[in-house]
Image: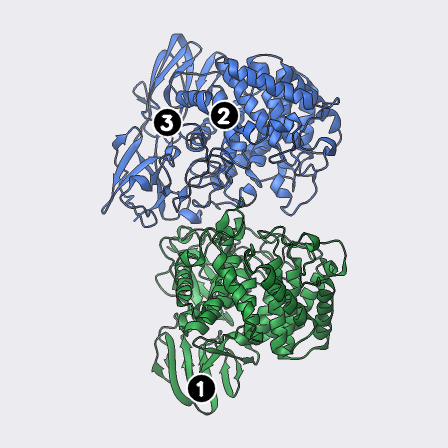
Chain colours: A green, B blue
Amino acid sequence: MKPVIPSRGTLEPTVFAFDGGFWGERQELNRSAILPHAHEWIERVGCLDNFRGKPFRGPLFADSDVYKHFEGLAWETGRRPDATFEAWMEEIGALAAANQDADGYLNTRYRDARYSDLEWGHELYSYGHLIQAAVARLRTHGEDELTQVARRAADHVCRQFARDGVCGHPEIELALVELYRATGAERYLHTAKAFVDRRGGPALRDTPRGRAYFQDEQPLRAAKAFRGHAVRALYLACGAVDVAVETGDEELLAAIIAQWEHTIARRTYVTGGMGSRHSDEDFGEDFELPSDRAYSETCAGVASVMLCWRLLLATGEARFADQAERTLYNVVATSPAQDGRAFFYANPLHQRVPGEIPPTDRESPRAGTSTRAPWFTVSCCPTNIGRTLASLSGYLATSRDGTLQIHQYANGTIDDVRVTTDYPWAGAVTVQADRERTISLRVPAWARGATLNGEPVAPGSVTTRGREWRLDLPMTPRWTRPDPRVDAIRGCVAAERGPLVYCLESIDQQHDDLDGVRVDASAPPSEEMTAPGEFLFVSEDATLQFSPYHSWGNRGPSTMRVWTPHT
Amino acid sequence: MKPVIPSRGTLEPTVFAFDGGFWGERQELNRSAILPHAHEWIERVGCLDNFRGKPFRGPLFADSDVYKHFEGLAWETGRRPDATFEAWMEEIGALAAANQDADGYLNTRYRDARYSDLEWGHELYSYGHLIQAAVARLRTHGEDELTQVARRAADHVCRQFARDGVCGHPEIELALVELYRATGAERYLHTAKAFVDRRGGPALRDTPRGRAYFQDEQPLRAAKAFRGHAVRALYLACGAVDVAVETGDEELLAAIIAQWEHTIARRTYVTGGMGSRHSDEDFGEDFELPSDRAYSETCAGVASVMLCWRLLLATGEARFADQAERTLYNVVATSPAQDGRAFFYANPLHQRVPGEIPPTDRESPRAGTSTRAPWFTVSCCPTNIGRTLASLSGYLATSRDGTLQIHQYANGTIDDVRVTTDYPWAGAVTVQADRERTISLRVPAWARGATLNGEPVAPGSVTTRGREWRLDLPMTPRWTRPDPRVDAIRGCVAAERGPLVYCLESIDQQHDDLDGVRVDASAPPSEEMTAPGEFLFVSEDATLQFSPYHSWGNRGPSTMRVWTPHT
């Protein structure tokens, strides 16, 4: 469960084994519901039939959903074996092999029209997911038919794109670097670096969407922020960090960090969501962060976590873990339904009308409604959730020179270290080692007033030696005020508690219409619990019940708002 | 210049002849620049070549741009003859005739695939513009080749769609009613009524955009507001009012008025702009009115004026003229550049970054930037501006039973009545008749403190008998506060003066960055004029210059905002 293993950098990933709790339960849900549900749907909508020679169905990049699904299966079987999952992977591997040309080319949509449309064709993007799937398999099992297919495809890419060309949708870059890390073959790193460097030359044809859409209007090093299509921008940034780390390119790493800082300060929702525009699934301009029309795609949340993890490994700075935590709890955890069989694709922070219930027998439009849909006409998100939950154990802790760093808190174990907590519902975290050792614990930026073994500790990382630690993070609900330059939420506050963003959902209130709601933000929200994590706030004329944002929309159509005007 | 001549209703249109002034100058600009510019571009992008048998180019509805252009030429030559315009119309008429099938079918895109895609094909939409062009020609000239083509097409439509079918893009409805009015042939009215009644049955196939996109998810009478694609919704409403008036369908008229009220109160910008979403060019939900991502399409502004005019003729109520005025000055007048050779397609109320300058040698994307573009890949707006300015004389005044109603103020004459004014720059309007008569003058809703011949008059319509009138409308700049349920502009004010909405444009300010600007709204804006209509506002730390919104973006890339946070 280590999706990223840099050969250089500050921290080395280590695996956290969940024992129940918030993420452990979701990892089990992934195994029991999300992955089987995804398998059923990629079969149903034709993604697998595309490999069986049937007339092509689905979006141009339908192959990639199969590979992302394989990646989820690979990580999950690495965690705990499963014969059904093995059989699915075997079939996918055989189908992929049967469709691969002698020179390594593989795509069920383009076949004889290979690379005729680099801007939109997603062929390299699909290889990227094939390669990530192969890396997962290599690291949890070893070589199999699919890993061989992926290596041949990667070698083909290195030959085919030796001199020019990039993909309209970045993804191949980070995949090639990881394949280099998994195999040691330097050609993969060199090709990834070439893709990163070529971009913005420009390398693609202009289209009506403009080159910024696929990050090709200027060299990556020259950009001031993440821009254009959010998932494209974030996957590209991941690949650039990987290239920078492996080649020792400090300038490139610094450029991405500067862009990340700008983007977090001006182009990111309180949930961690990125990419505000429905049109072009684009970042939009600074401070263009509407709540109601927030796109905040689930895949952009996944990509943001991937990027934060890479930056954390490269620098060791707690702020990247802070942002990963915010995004995991408030975007990634928001997408899947409680039963694991429906998903949010977009993650708005304000639902103005109770939406229609999506159909259960066919794909839904991706822009979505107020309840989750089983599958989408463009269905990148469900398989992204599947592979992320299956590999989440690899995103929580690191080590370096014998010191263990725990960045995210969950109930479970890291090798011989036991973490006991009911986080994020409660703020107490106990860490026990079977011998004296040095451990670094992250104190989240929101945790003012935290204590470690009874002593006050400031946000950041605190490193101490011992055998048992007790970290207490204050879980008092708080009001968060927005940057005054964000027009859409001026005069509003958001309720937060620990790492969770809260919301008002109409089903919990006395009135359906949330447009007229006001809160008195002069005092902090009350802490009266009605269920774990749910609390009441009492205003002058109404009692308002705030619930965790990630859980909204699970009880039928409703209206909802994260930001509420204050009196 | 009477685009709408109801056979029933409250008021009868009459023609206002401009003598210079705000609209007179724009009508001349239309003649000297906009119409020739449009002709050049419909030739350049292939709209005319499509009629000459060349491979089809442009959007599915490219034919309609030719017809809208013809309509503008027809109205303009009715105002003042022009041999060049006549030659253009003659060529268009001949091209249309040459492409028409024996049974009346005419479309350069579909030809042998007729009506294979009613949802997207726009064939009936294109007939609608052909018919409107023909009506303009009939009313300013008489029969010619194009009017014959249009009649044959209309007859074909009546036969072809006798039993079922509607067009994905409404427009044919209002056109058929007007052709009925111009010719007396009742089959056109009956077919228009059938199209209005069938819609929402549903009458079209479902698509990923959903049926509300083309107003087919419920019967028009059942809707609570205008919804879906804004131009579609507004053209449909126009056609429905026309049908309701001609058939005496009071229930349908009342339904449209109720929808209009809801839409004005909850789904309309302060500029009069409608359709906030870029995605699907959609109305969006109530109070979903972002300033920065306002789509507010120019064509939706034109359509809103068309609808207001129909409702004014049907009811005589001043509120419809109020809304038409707001939309004419702040959407329709905003689109064309000062030189008449570039246009805004979208009309945002907040420009966050100085945009790129559009190319002059090719079409621009419609979503636009901070300066106007000469033509668009989908270029419905420029020809809509052309036909609207050419026929604008028909949208200002009416008569009934010997009483003249002046709804909009401009310098010029209505038959033997002379109106002298520098409106909208000054509020004094003098009306002189050559004999004693009864005249009704509109006092705009914003004009609190207006006087007529020195006596206070309240907003609404004031009807008096005499030979000379002096109306004084207060032109003091004022702050307008938003509905508190509109999240995007909470805590902001907009500067208005008379019928004009004002804005801050960065080029006029000490600082480029308008994100941090604040105004003290406790006192009204100062009236210090720097040019006609431009005034300064002095805040504590900076002098801010407000300019009319319609004039923004004429001096190169800049940032801009209509709504400004107040302290």
Would residue B201 be seen by someone viewing this image from the given angle? Answer: yes
The answer as to whether the residues below labels 1 and 2 share one chain is: no
Is label 1 or label 3 in front? 1
Q: CA distance from mark 1 to mark 3?
A: 83 Å
The chain that hosts pointer 2 is B
The one nearer the camera, A280 or A19, is A280
- Name the foreground residue: A117 vs B263: A117
Q: Secondary structure at mark 1?
A: loop
The Cα atoms of the two marked residues, 3 and 2, are separated by: 35 Å
Question: Which mark is on residue B209?
Answer: none
Across and down, in percent, residue B398 comes to: 48, 18
Tag 3 residue: B458
Residue B285 position in % (x across, y down):
53, 46
The residue shown at (75%, 21%) is B102
Q: Secondary structure at mark 2?
A: helix
**Residue plotted at (38% across, 66% down):** A524
Q: Is residue B188 above or below residue A550?
A: above
Query: Looking at the image, is B326 positioned above or below residue B365?
Result: above
Decide if residue A331 is in sight here.
Answer: no
Residue denoted by label 1: A402
Tell me if A287 is positioned left or right of B60 in this view: left
Q: Which residue is mark 2?
A: B386
Tell me the kind of residue under disc 2. Answer: Gly
Q: Position of residue A555 (x, y in %)?
A: 60, 61
For mark 3, give the secondary structure: loop
Q: Nearer the viewer, residue A246 or A187?
A: A187
Residue type (three-letter) at the residue carrying disc 3? Ala
